[in-house]
Image (cartoon, helix red, strand yellow):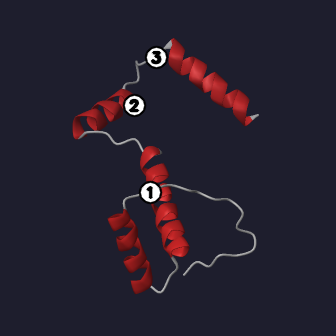
Amino acid sequence: MATDSPKSEARINFRLPADLKQQIEQAAAHLGQSVSEFAASNLAQAAQETIREQSVTQLTNQDRDLFFALLDDVEAQPNDALKAAAQNYTQQME
Protein backbone atom coordinates (compact mmCIF):
# COMPACT_ATOMS: atom_id res chain seq x y z
CA MET A 1 0.00 0.00 0.00
CA ALA A 2 1.41 3.36 -1.02
CA THR A 3 1.36 6.22 1.42
CA ASP A 4 1.52 9.94 0.88
CA SER A 5 4.91 11.16 1.96
CA PRO A 6 6.19 14.66 2.59
CA LYS A 7 8.16 14.29 -0.66
CA SER A 8 4.95 14.07 -2.74
CA GLU A 9 4.80 17.45 -4.41
CA ALA A 10 3.28 16.88 -7.85
CA ARG A 11 -0.47 17.05 -8.31
CA ILE A 12 -2.96 15.90 -10.91
CA ASN A 13 -6.40 17.46 -10.85
CA PHE A 14 -9.27 16.32 -13.04
CA ARG A 15 -13.04 16.12 -13.06
CA LEU A 16 -15.03 12.94 -13.43
CA PRO A 17 -18.66 11.87 -13.17
CA ALA A 18 -20.01 11.63 -9.62
CA ASP A 19 -20.90 7.95 -10.00
CA LEU A 20 -17.34 7.12 -11.08
CA LYS A 21 -15.94 9.03 -8.10
CA GLN A 22 -18.21 7.03 -5.83
CA GLN A 23 -16.98 3.76 -7.38
CA ILE A 24 -13.37 4.83 -6.89
CA GLU A 25 -14.03 5.74 -3.26
CA GLN A 26 -15.70 2.37 -2.70
CA ALA A 27 -12.85 0.45 -4.35
CA ALA A 28 -10.26 2.37 -2.33
CA ALA A 29 -12.17 1.64 0.88
CA HIS A 30 -12.28 -2.08 0.05
CA LEU A 31 -8.49 -2.04 -0.21
CA GLY A 32 -8.01 0.10 2.89
CA GLN A 33 -6.50 2.90 0.83
CA SER A 34 -7.23 6.56 0.51
CA VAL A 35 -8.60 7.74 -2.82
CA SER A 36 -5.22 9.35 -3.52
CA GLU A 37 -3.35 6.12 -2.80
CA PHE A 38 -5.77 4.11 -4.91
CA ALA A 39 -5.63 6.56 -7.81
CA ALA A 40 -1.84 6.92 -7.71
CA SER A 41 -1.19 3.17 -7.64
CA ASN A 42 -3.67 2.45 -10.45
CA LEU A 43 -2.49 5.36 -12.58
CA ALA A 44 1.13 4.28 -12.11
CA GLN A 45 0.27 0.72 -13.13
CA ALA A 46 -1.62 1.93 -16.21
CA ALA A 47 1.23 4.26 -17.16
CA GLN A 48 3.83 1.49 -16.85
CA GLU A 49 1.69 -0.87 -18.94
CA THR A 50 1.15 1.78 -21.62
CA ILE A 51 4.86 2.57 -21.81
CA ARG A 52 5.72 -1.14 -21.96
CA GLU A 53 3.17 -1.76 -24.74
CA GLN A 54 4.47 1.19 -26.76
CA SER A 55 8.08 0.04 -26.48
CA VAL A 56 7.40 -3.38 -28.03
CA THR A 57 6.96 -3.98 -31.74
CA GLN A 58 4.61 -6.84 -32.47
CA LEU A 59 4.78 -8.61 -35.79
CA THR A 60 2.32 -10.89 -37.49
CA ASN A 61 3.60 -14.38 -38.23
CA GLN A 62 3.98 -13.35 -41.87
CA ASP A 63 5.99 -10.23 -40.94
CA ARG A 64 8.16 -12.28 -38.56
CA ASP A 65 8.91 -14.84 -41.26
CA LEU A 66 9.79 -12.08 -43.74
CA PHE A 67 12.02 -10.38 -41.15
CA PHE A 68 13.97 -13.56 -40.47
CA ALA A 69 14.22 -14.36 -44.17
CA LEU A 70 15.73 -10.92 -44.78
CA LEU A 71 18.20 -11.44 -41.93
CA ASP A 72 19.27 -14.74 -43.49
CA ASP A 73 19.65 -13.23 -46.98
CA VAL A 74 23.42 -12.98 -47.45
CA GLU A 75 22.97 -10.84 -50.59
CA ALA A 76 20.83 -8.20 -48.88
CA GLN A 77 22.39 -4.75 -48.59
CA PRO A 78 21.34 -1.99 -46.19
CA ASN A 79 19.52 0.94 -47.78
CA ASP A 80 20.47 4.57 -47.17
CA ALA A 81 17.95 4.99 -44.33
CA LEU A 82 19.34 1.97 -42.49
CA LYS A 83 22.91 3.19 -42.96
CA ALA A 84 21.95 6.63 -41.62
CA ALA A 85 20.16 5.06 -38.64
CA ALA A 86 23.20 2.91 -37.84
CA GLN A 87 25.51 5.93 -38.09
CA ASN A 88 23.19 7.98 -35.88
CA TYR A 89 23.07 5.19 -33.30
CA THR A 90 26.86 4.85 -33.31
CA GLN A 91 27.30 8.59 -32.78
CA GLN A 92 24.83 8.58 -29.86
CA MET A 93 26.67 5.71 -28.20
CA GLU A 94 30.06 7.44 -28.33
Q: Secondary structure at mark 1?
A: helix
Q: Earlier in the sequence, mark 3 or mark 2?
A: 2
Quadrant (top left/top right/bottom left/bottom right) for the N terminus: bottom right
Residue found 72% across the figure and 28% down from its top: 91
Q: CA distance from mark 3 to mark 1?
A: 36 Å
- Establish if 23 lies above or below 15: below
Residue 60: x and y in percent read: 25, 39
- Give me the residue at 46% from left, 55% from top: 15
Earlier sequence position, callout 2 versus callout 1:
1
Look at mark 2 in the image and give the residue it sits on: 71
Seen as rendered, the residue at the extreme front is 18
User: Measured along the vertical axis of the image, is residue 76 above or below residue 9?
Assistant: above
Q: How many marks?
A: 3
Residue at 30% x, 37% y: name it: 64
Residue bearing the label numbered 3: 77
Q: Quadrant of residue 72?
A: top left
Q: Secondary structure at mark 3?
A: loop
Quadrant where the C terminus lies?
A: top right
* Amino acid type of the residue that numbered disc 2 sits on in the rendered structure: Leu
Give the residue type that dot 1 points to. Answer: Glu
Across and down, in percent, residue 84 comes to: 59, 18
Label 3 close to label 1 by CB (< 8 Å): no
Frontmost of labels 2 and 1 is 1
Residue 35 in the image, given as x and y percentages of width and height:
50, 74
Distance from label 3 to label 2 (Cα)?
10 Å
Dot 3 or dot 1: first in sequence order is 1
The amino acid at mark 3 is Gln
**Residue situated in front as seen by the camera: 30 or 62:** 30
Q: Which of the pair 37/21 is nearer the observer?
A: 21
Residue designated by label 1: 49
How far apart are the alpha carbons under marks 2 and 1? 30 Å
Dot in front, 3 or 1: 1
